[in-house]
Image (cartoon, rainbow, N blue to C red):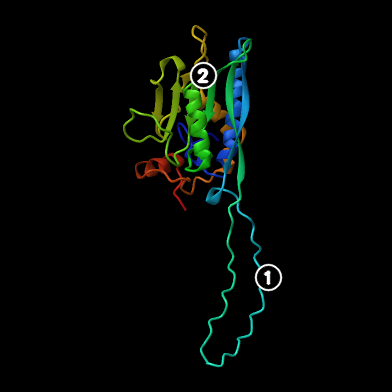
Amino acid sequence: MASPFPGMDPYLEHPEIWPGVHLLLIAALAESLGPQLRPKYSVSVEVRMYETSGDQALLVGIPDVAIQRAKPQTEVVPTAVAVAPSPQPIQVRVPMPLTVRQGYLEVREVTTKEVVTAIELLSPINKRSGRGRQTYESKREQVLSSATHFVEIDLLRAHEPMEVFGIEGQSDYRILLSRSEQRPIASLYAFSVRHAIPTFSLPLREGDLEPTVDLQGLLTEIYDRSGYDLKLDYRVEPVPPLSEANVDWSRNRTGISPL
């Protein structure tokens, strides 16, 4: 069964679902673009390491039953002044550094090995405040300061979107297309859960035929092949929740009333 939504399915954004969608979509992009880019260009999946800690990282497991010391006997004080019992230890959690591996795409010119275009598909680690976002923003700035074209795909409604200037109002999702020769001007596709995901041309060297990226088609294939209609529960609200303006619309699309 196909997704009941015309574009990005908001139920795919669930923290337990999105990591799998991210991996599949990165792989699908690479498989789709590879044949179209030959023989001048090649596309490869690269991996970036993120480190995070605190509430955003895994914590040390604390056993349910902790070893308790025997209560000390109350010392007899001649003055008969009550002595407060010694404080007992409490269970706490210590932050552990967590290394997150995330894939992205690079299009390289075969003869020169130069990176012509970088394609990023955002995950919560990129958008959530903390080390992960700081690391990503640093890499983003490096690419935007280089001669490499940049494509940034944000199919997540949670957390603050990446910074751009000149946009008014909010949007659910974004695709940023930054051609190196046109910077600081870039093209931003801002769309809502009610829209199909826009197609766009992948920037390459001047004069080369640019393939069309059909994210909607790729996501539809992933949804069907992976059986997400069997994994997603449309009887509950999506995580994160939709805006009030889209709640009734979503329920009409799914045809199922919430539990």
Q: Is residue 54 above or below residue 11?
A: below
Give amino acid for label 1: Ile
Read off the residue under disc 2: 148
Quadrant of the image occupied by residue 51: top right
Q: CA distance from mark 1 to mark 2?
A: 57 Å
Residue occupying image coordinates x 46% and y 17%: 180
Residue occupying image coordinates x 48% and y 36%: 9
Q: Residue furthest top?
A: 207
- Under circle 2, the secondary element is loop
Q: Nearer the viewer, residue 235 or 208?
A: 208
Q: Is residue 12 visible?
A: no
- Quick check: 61 left or right of 121? right
Q: Nearer the viewer, residue 193 or 19?
A: 19
Q: Nearer the viewer, residue 239 or 256?
A: 239
Residue 251 position, x and y percent, is 42, 44
Residue occupying image coordinates x 60% and y 86%: 74
Read off the residue under disc 1: 67
Residue 36 position, x and y percent, is 59, 14
Give amino acid for label 2: Thr
Residue 84 position, x and y percent, is 53, 81
Q: Marks 1 and 2: CB-CB under 8 Å?
A: no
- Under circle 1, the secondary element is loop
Q: Residues within 10 Å of mark 2 (few under 14, many from 20)?
A: many
Quadrant of the image occupied by residue 186: top left
Q: Is residue 97 visible?
A: yes
Residue 158 position, x and y percent, is 45, 42
Placement of the N terminus among the 4 image quadrants = top right
Q: Is residue 177 above or below residue 173?
A: above
Q: Earlier in the sequence, mark 1 or mark 2?
A: 1
Question: How many discs appear?
Answer: 2
Q: Residue furthest left?
A: 168
Q: Is residue 238 above or below residue 136?
A: below
